[in-house]
Image (tube, helix red, strand yellow):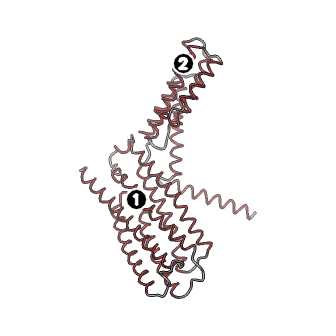
Amino acid sequence: MGRERTSVTERRRRVRAWASRVRQPGGLERQTLELIGKSALAASISWYLAHDVMAATSPAFAPFSAVLITQVTAYQSLHQALRYLGAVGLGVFVQAGLGLLAGPDLLTFVLVALIALVIGRWPTLGPQGGQVTTAAFFAFSAYAAASGTAQRLTQLGEILALVGIGCAVALVINLGVWPPVRYRRAEHGIRMLAQALVGLLDDIHPALRDEDWDEERSDNWRKRATALGTTVTHSRSAFATAWESRFYNARRHLPGSTHDQGLDNYQALIDALERVTYQVASMTRTLSKWRREEDGEESRGFLTDYADLLEALARIICRFAEIDGKDLAQQAREACACAETARDKREELVAGARRTELPLSDPSQPYGILLAEATRLMDEAQYACDVLRHVVDGTARHSAGTR
């Protein structure tokens, strides 16, 4: 019974965590639900038009096409719609040509399959290349079931019309009725990476200060730092999605839409944070090699000063975890102020270490390596602040130029 209660409690906790992520604009869960909602809406409207308005023989082509074309971004939807229409058109025309020449028999089907499969390899069609074969097979089935040349051509034309309806409905919904929120998605990518960095640093610095860490915990830090590479990839994917969403997106023309000018520079912010992740990963590798016999008052003082520096660096990165296009100027000032504090902490660390008899120049000991890592970490954090300040300056110049 106890295990079952624990399992139920854990499931409830996961559901609450998922619901919390859904409420966050720009998150993956929110994006997934929006895509499901758009797809369902596009499919329903397409079915109504095909079944109730057109009274089509095969109305499922319309909602199928609508769901296939509904993408995360308006740009992707339009791009894939053009490819999909081309692929379906080629498949239908292959069937129409061979069907008129040879009739709907087995030999014709073999030729249709071979030609459609070859055309589907055309790089221009991209991921929609497989739809050439799909369309050709469905067209062959409709062609064979119809009686008379006129009815057969009508069936093929109906397939093209239904596909066009599905694509048109999906594009209208994705471009005009329910376009994606591009800028929040870009901000989410930066926040996601910064939060992962802050979470790791906030786990490390108290442990160093209190000497509450062992080999297992330091190995966990190293693994988490290595996993930051995956987080960087997700952040870049979020930025790419936001960038694509700018194209053909109706929201950029709405009153009050002023965020496009900052989006251009968000890639630089992700690059700057990525450089910080490299140094954090290097530092955790050094800490994972720390020998527990490294003890004494001077060693404890070194770790305390190092913890103070990491805490100050975490406060810098925390500003990126809260990034908001409307408050970039204030956040840049706060980040630069935190950088000044972190620089003072680094100087205290270096000065304190030099006053001790710790083997700073011994490459087999961690002290000198950690000091070098501290300097590089400070440099990269300062660079991230400079990039944020540059983004703010560029945004201000853009705003002034559009008045």
Residue 200 point in image, percent of width and height: 52, 68
Name the N-terminal-most of marks 2 and 1: 2
The residue where tag 2 is placed is: 96
The image quadrant where one finds the N terminus is bottom right
- Asked if 184 appears above or below 159 in the picture, the reply is below
**Label 2: which secondary element:** helix
Q: Residue at x 42, y 73 (%)?
A: 375
User: Who is closer to the viewer here, 50 or 96?
Assistant: 96
> Across the whole image, how many numbered discs are drawn on residues?
2
Residue ranking furthest to the right: 1
Residue 337 point in image, percent of width and height: 35, 71
Mark 2: amino acid: Ala
- Decide: marks 2, 1 in contact (CB < 8 A)? no
Mark 1: amino acid: Leu
User: Who is closer to the viewer here, 161 or 383?
Assistant: 383
Kindly report the distance in space between the C-alpha atoms of the residues bearing marks 2 and 1.
53 Å
Residue 262 point in image, percent of width and height: 35, 54
Q: Residue 269 carries which label?
A: 1
Snapshot quadrant of residue 325: bottom left
- Asked if 279 appears above or below 133 in the picture, the reply is below
User: Who is closer to the viewer here, 330 or 1?
Assistant: 330
- Asked if 163 appears above or below 77 in the picture, the reply is above
Residue 28 point in image, percent of width and height: 52, 52
Q: Residue at x 54, y 39 (%)?
A: 40
**Label 1: which secondary element:** helix
Q: Residue at x 51, y 77 (%)?
A: 363
- Asked if 176 appears above or below 357 in the picture, the reply is above
One can see residue 169 in this view: no
